[in-house]
Image (cartoon, rainbow, N blue to C red):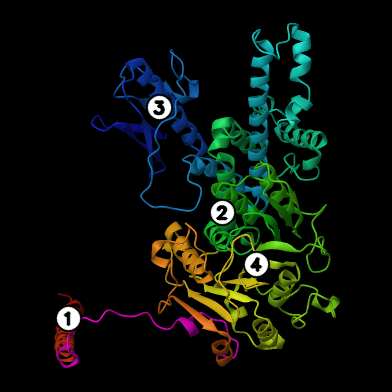
Amino acid sequence: MAALSLAASKTVEPFYYTVIIHQRNQRNKFFLEVESGHSSREKMRAKVCWRLYQAMAYAEATDIHTVFVLLREFPEFVLNYKEHILSSKGVLMSTTKRRTSPYKTNGATLGFEEKLWAAADKLRAHMDAAEYKHVVLGLIFLKYISDAFETRHSALEHDLSDPSSAAYVREPAARYEVLEDRDEYTAENVFWVPAEARWDRLQSQAKSPQVGKLIDDAMTAIERENPRLRGVLPKTYARPDLDKTRLGELLDLIGTIGLGDPESQKKDILGRTYEYFLGRFASAEGKGGGEFYTPACVVKLLVAMIEPYHGRVYDPCCGSGGMFVQSERFVQEHGGRIGDIAVYGQESNPTTWRLAKMNLAIRGIEADLGPEPADSFLRDLHPDLRADFILANPPFNMSEWGGERLEGDPRWKYGAPPRNNANYAWIQHMIYHLAPRGVAGFVLANGSMSSNTSGEGEIRKAMVEADLVDCMIALPGQLFYSTQIPACLWFLARDKSGGNGKTPKRDRRGETLFIDARKLGTMRDRTHRELTDEDIARIAAVYHAWRGLETLKVSETFRVYEDIPGFCKRATLEEIRGHNYVLTPGRYVGVEDLEDDDEPFEEKFTRLTAKLEEQFAESRRLEEQIRHKLERLDHGE
């Protein structure tokens, strides 16, 4: 039997109840918080009640079957989860302050993700992460559009029922007709959700053995009514190997989270949930899963560097669409509007293409990802596109890419890429699609900066001599879920003269900036590192200062560019030629300056030698002590 106990703090506001869940000799702990303020006892009781309900939902999600709670603050109030006794006075669903972690992260931290992940993770009993991510993300998407629909439905119903409203309709039958008028929703950029696909109806059938078929039918109905989503939503919930009991539990749990209401949209809860889940799925899937996901910190760095304020943004291998999402977010954060950029992309994996369509649809981002998934090399869906900004994370060192079928392709202006490695095919594909003043930023394996095999060195030499390489960044290791191969960032610019653009820059012709960021970042867990917001700001500030951008984004420290030994270096074309066109930043930035302690060398040498002798002596003493103890053991003492 599992138990859930609480210990209340009486001295801190808001109150924090430590919830400890005992299960099979394991102890899982999280904080249940209640903001007391000047609330009456009844209001305080109701707040505690609601938080306990959330805690018990967590307990159920982690496979705890029996929960019994006794509140010390309210000894008369006993909760038994099996009977769903909540409060005779009702539940006050109030917003309280969240207990925040001292660790700053670029990921989504909402408070309920671990609970949701725990429930979703139970589906892995019969399928791997590559399959069940679509089950979970499809349900989250369905909940979002249903919430948004219900919000619009409620607002419309209020106006139609209010005699003082200009939209007032007296007759109930006529009022119902307006409520069910599809145009009333689509005009407000809300997806029309037919009656059979609405969340309340589906959740009411969560315990039914037919719940999978009902969800599939709901997805089909939504696609039928919303052309933008046609062929996008997953419809595999009725499959025999999907545990319907667990599916119903997941449906119930997602039902407790608001996603499409105005407050949730303001906080971008759905988008952040998607980011969190994409990251967790990439981690769970390992090598294969990361192909569709670029860590949020890397995307943020790419966007902070090239600043896609306006114009055409293109990603030839767009995965789940993270580059576009961050670009739109950047525009909005800097005073622009969603829609200031035109989004173009392509993705060859059918399931990932659908995932990208959903990811962009939930944010209201109009994107041209082509009518269907397709290979960017063999079937370029945007052959005439010349993009102002290109952001990409192509698959590293892709060997089977169809190079033998593309001999003489006009994209290979700087040399034919090797058939067994697509790195330089991706680079030249992006150069081909750059506008006359376009800028590209993309991720590649470190080997792309120095490889000379199969003509890659000659292609790189031709690009350097064409003065296309604007900046090279060596990244720290362990950033990616999908690979342990060291990675770097390339930034290419068609025109480095600095003039004629909306934001004039310094003339950088004949120069390339090298940044060695390998020492930056913080370990997120035992195997994954993350660039902090401060790291991203530092790198971007150096780049903008070097380009001569006098903007608020350039910190005072880097307003005037200077080389920093061990970190950044402005190199001329002659210097790059001297290094045989190898673009590894470590070759150029040199070694970090060490602080001089002013101690004369002779004195330091004598002091350190004496210290070393002391350590040798201590080592010998410990060795003798160990030998003595081993001898005693050998003699049975």
User: Which residue is disc 4 drawn over?
Assistant: 440
- The stretch drawn in magenta includes residue 596: yes
Q: Amino acid at mark 4?
A: Ala
CB within 8 Å, label 4 to label 3: no
391 relative position to 229: left or right: left
Q: Which residue is mark 1?
A: 622
In this view, the residue in front, 172 or 622, is 172
Q: Amino acid at mark 2?
A: Gly
Q: Is residue 81 above or below residue 500?
A: above
Foreground tag (4 vs 2): 4
**Foreground tag (4 vs 3):** 4
Please tell me which residue lies in front, 575 or 21: 575
Give the CA distance from mark 3 to mark 2.
34 Å
Q: Which residues are magenta?
A: 579-604
Say what secondary structure mark 3 lies in. Answer: strand
Residue 279, labelled with which disc?
A: 2
Label 2 near label 3: C-beta < 8 Å?
no
Q: Quadrant of the N terminus?
A: top left
Q: Earlier in the sequence, mark 4 or mark 3?
A: 3
User: In which image quadrant can residue 48 be found?
Assistant: top left
Q: Is residue 475 left or right of residue 457?
A: left
Q: Amino acid at mark 3?
A: Phe
**How far apart, in angstroms, are the residues tagged by discs 1 and 4?**
60 Å
